[in-house]
Amino acid sequence: MFALLRDRKVRGILFQLLTVIGLVAFLWYIGTNTVHNIEQRGIQTGFGFLNGTAGFAINDTPVAYNETYTHGRVFLVGLLNTLIISFVVIILSTILGLLIGVLRLSNNWLIAKLSSAYIDIFRNIPILLQILFWYNVVLATLPSPRKSIELFGSIFINNRGFYVPKPALNATTISMIIAVFLAVIIIFFLNRWSNKRHERTGQEFPVLFTGIGLIIVLPIIAFFIGGSDMNLSYPVLKGFNFRGGKTFYPEFLALTFALTIYTATFIAEAVRSGIEAVSKGQKEAAASIGLSSYQSLKLVVLPQAIRIAIPPTINQYLNIVKNSSLATAIGYPELVTVFAGTSLNQVGQAIEIISMTMLVYLVVSLAVSALLNWINFKMKIKER
Amino acid sequence: MKSKIAKISMAAIAVIGLSASVANADTLSDTKAQGYLKCGINSGLPGFASADSKGNWSGIDISVCRAVAAAVLGDASKVKFTSLNAKERFTALQSGEIDLLSRNTTWTETRDSSLGLNFAGVNFYDGQGFMVHKSIGVKNAKELNGAAVCVQSGTTTELNLADYFRKNGMKYKLVAYDSNDQVVKGYESGRCDVITSDSSQLYSLRIKLKNPNGSMVLPNIISKEPLGPVVRQGDDKWFNIVKWSYAAMVAAEEAGITSKNVDSMLKSNNPTVKRILGVEGKLGENLGLSKNFAYNIIKQVGNYGEVFDRTVGMNSPLKIKRGLNALWTKGGLQYSPPFR
Ligand SMILES: N[C@@H](CCC(=O)N[C@@H](CS)C(=O)NCC(=O)O)C(=O)O
């Protein structure tokens, strides 16, 4: 018996077993204790509250919602808003960050300095302050609804939001959507073909410009084929506010702006360090075989830089999702604001609601890191 | 960062608090042992809870904290205040971060039943009202169809608003913020046409605006808001202490005992006064307190009428009339169960 204990392997297994048992017992203890305490204090438990009427309004809802809907619906609204804002900010901050990161290394002294000043300033101010700042600036500078800024007679900007005409879903708009998809598919294959041809013959094909052309021209053609009527609903001033059309609320705009400006600084730094990590010899080699500096950037430097820049950039994407919850300060109705905030306050079931909320963030994080691993795998330098 | 971290940590505290405090429901002993009362309050609401430049808190809600501290510890100054916004308050109480919540909190059925709370009385009868920019030319809340309304989230205010517009077949655009500061900023910058809150606050809010004359309070009162101190469910002894500490202030006003005359009242031969002040009987001991707990409250904090006048009433900048908050003998609703 004791001899067995002296065996390393057996001992190892034994200790692991004990740890697991201890952990389970501890969790069990906490769990039962919590349930007991909650019951004793008369706090409701369980997920029944998700079917209860919410009773409060939400100002920006991607799906149908009013105060007679349930807390379950509030969860959905919050979740969708979190995803929407994250998606938009990810796209915009990537574009801005890429641009600034490249400009930061520009040979033009002024441009390089301006870019690095931008990075230094916006990266070091706490994001919550930036959100509040931009929000209150937006509110303070824009006019009231009756004095709205008007563009083309159909777009209105005031301190209640940004009002644009909204197309209905009909033959025209559907054919335009299909056209966009078509364009994307064509570009994909075009790119493949051009790469192959480039490898074979060394000739280049202007994929970027053709692509941009396709994305613009195809939907225009579809517009005419589809009946050239988008059946737009226009915003009109009625009483206190504009009605009709599509509204982008100041909360959404300020949050998008603040998060984009902030996150772009980190992405720019990732891009810069990626580019700087590509050894000088590579650029010199590119120059010596007669590539122009644009070609050298595009064909030699960026493909290698991106490998290095992608992991930190994706981490920033994760931060965007998490930082979007700071929206509670300005009342943009994302998950933490409406569900972990207002619903929690109405029903008081902290444990259920916070668990659901944390689960959402956990799933998003896991999904993003899975994506990261996949990209890393794809991007690995293939030894030939 | 603050709000998110605050929220998550609050929740974590809730979980830990709820799981760790095994059979620990003796708030009285805990409070005595630590030597101060943990009281949750508003972060700043003139008349209810506001701090002067030296950080001394005062207000009608603060007085309840002080009264309980005087009753339990014999010293009204032994209070640790925690400012909470509307959304944070219940979690803070449930998790044991505070032991008494005195933050203009409306007594509702849901809060009393399913949130695991107990309301220990009503220290201010309020109702919900509206304030509008004069420029929108509205004189009555019924004309507000289509307006954008600023409100603090996590309040009954938010719910009453939804009910009121629904009941009257009107539409509105909700603009809800966590902090009162941002609510006021939103209103001042014109993000919304209307601000709505418990009406006791609208007047002081209006005075603080950059241009008070540009705004007016509408005559409509759309709800009942009985505001009162709250404790956790499950500690009846503590519930009783808070309930009777508050009642002592009202009873003192009914019996004509004030902070000024309380010492001479010790010699009164009115049996009610004798029982309140602990000269006769052992009401204090029954609560687990000292004989003279009410004496301490009245001496150090004052009776209900004194507190009202000093914080929100005629001797304060708010100049709110007693109205519903007068004693029942004077046409109001303030009424103490008998001290016997
Ligand atoms: N009595 C209501 C409202 C309480 C409340 O939080 N009111 C807001 C204004 S409507 C407030 O006191 N704000 C001040 C602050 O948070 O500083 C309730 O219990 O839900």
Image: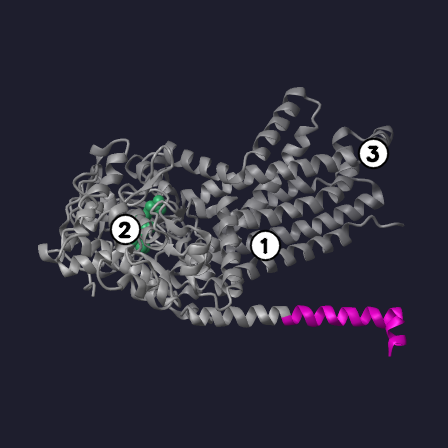
Q: Nearer the viewer, mark 1 or mark 3?
A: 3
User: Would you say the magenta stretch is mainly helix, strand or loop?
Assistant: helix
Identify residue for label 3. A279
Assign a secondary structure to mark 3: loop
Q: Position of residue B83 (x, y in %)?
A: 40, 46
- The answer to whether residue A383 shows anywhere in this view is yes
Residue A17 belongs to the span the image colors magenta: yes
- Check disc 1 and report its element: helix, strand or loop: helix
Q: Would residue B189 be found to the left or right of residue A328 on screen?
A: left
Which chain is mark 1 on?
A: A
Neighbour class for label 2 at 10 Å: few (<14), some, many (≥20)? Answer: many
A188 left or right of B122 in image: right
Residue at image location 50% in from the left, 49% down from the top:
B6
On the same chain, marks 1 and 2? The answer is no
The residue that appears at 83% across and 34% down in the rendered structure is A279
Query: In the rendered image, which residue does mark 1 sit on?
Result: A181
Which span is picked out in magenta? A1-25
